[in-house]
């Protein structure tokens, strides 16, 4: 049960739990994984790309419109590089995009373009998590072979409590290790 040497693409989306994704990069590297990070524009409102670059030791990708990276179809190279993809945190919006095959940003495009297994760590308000549309999207994604970890139950950012907390970084690393075994 190890991810040593595994190439993990971490896709960070725009929720407050994005701060946990920085610790996830650290934990993945501690476990011996090679980590690259792709972020949505909204994720950068919570944590700067420089944080992920410093922790991963790799440039961070955040746009399909990066002329230098896309001159060589960089999003396809990155999607092909990954042996495992983790979407953490995965917002309700991202789950809906992935469930319906939308590819309007780098993260959703990478998830459609990869052949690697995808592990999703949802994070959102408990009412959003329980909403019938979100539940249907989760079932659709499971049917497409995506794996889920969490969300956990507990205090949420807005002061409420319920299912919606992103799984802890150590739990995500352990789930990746189980999947790689």
Image (tube, rainbow, N blue to C red):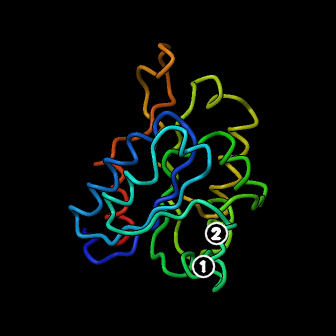
Q: Is residue 56 left or right of residue 128?
A: left
Q: In the figure, 33 relative to 137: above or below?
A: below
User: Circle 2 is placed at which residue position?
Assistant: 66
- What residue do we see at 78% from left, 58% from top? 102
- The numbered mark at residue 179 is none
Badge 1, how many Cα within 10 Å: few under 14, some, many 20+?
Answer: some
Residue 114 image offset from top left, x and y in percent? 60, 74
First reached walking from the N terminus: tag 2 or tag 1 = 2
Residue 180 image offset from top left, x and y in percent? 36, 71
Q: Is residue 31 left or right of residue 98?
A: left
User: Circle 1 is placed at which residue position?
Assistant: 74
Q: Element at badge 1?
A: helix
- What residue do we see at 62% from left, 74% from top? 75
Direction front: furthest residue: 68
- What residue do we see at 45% from left, 47% from top? 48
Of the pair 109 and 96, the residue shown nearer to us: 109
Is disc 2 in contact with disc 1, using a CB cutoff of under 8 Å?
yes
**Image quarter of residue 68:** bottom right
Of the pair 8 and 37, the residue shown nearer to us: 37
Badge 2, how many Cα within 10 Å: few under 14, some, many 20+?
Answer: few
Q: Is residue 135 visible?
A: yes
Viewport quadrant of the N terminus: bottom left
Q: Element at badge 2?
A: loop
């Amino acid at each position: 049960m190890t991810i040593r040497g595994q190439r993990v693409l971490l896709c960070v989306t725009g929720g407050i739990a994005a701060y946990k994704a920085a610790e996830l990069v650290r934990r993945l590297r501690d476990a011996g994984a090679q980590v690259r990070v792709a972020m949505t524009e909204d994720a950068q409102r919570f944590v700067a790309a420089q944080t992920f670059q410093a922790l991963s030791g790799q440039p961070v990708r955040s746009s399909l419109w990066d002329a230098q990276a896309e001159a060589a179809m960089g999003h396809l190279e990155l999607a092909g590089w990954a042996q495992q993809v983790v979407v953490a945190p995965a917002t309700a919006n991202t789950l809906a995009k992935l469930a319906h095959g939308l590819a309007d940003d780098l993260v959703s495009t990478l998830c459609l373009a990869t052949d690697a297994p995808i592990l999703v760590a949802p994070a959102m308000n408990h009412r959003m998590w329980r909403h019938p549309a979100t539940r249907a999207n989760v079932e659709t994604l499971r049917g497409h072979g995506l794996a889920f970890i969490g969300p956990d139950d507990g205090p949420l950012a807005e002061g409420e409590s319920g299912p919606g907390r992103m799984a802890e970084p150590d739990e995500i690393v352990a789930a990746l290790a189980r999947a790689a075994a």
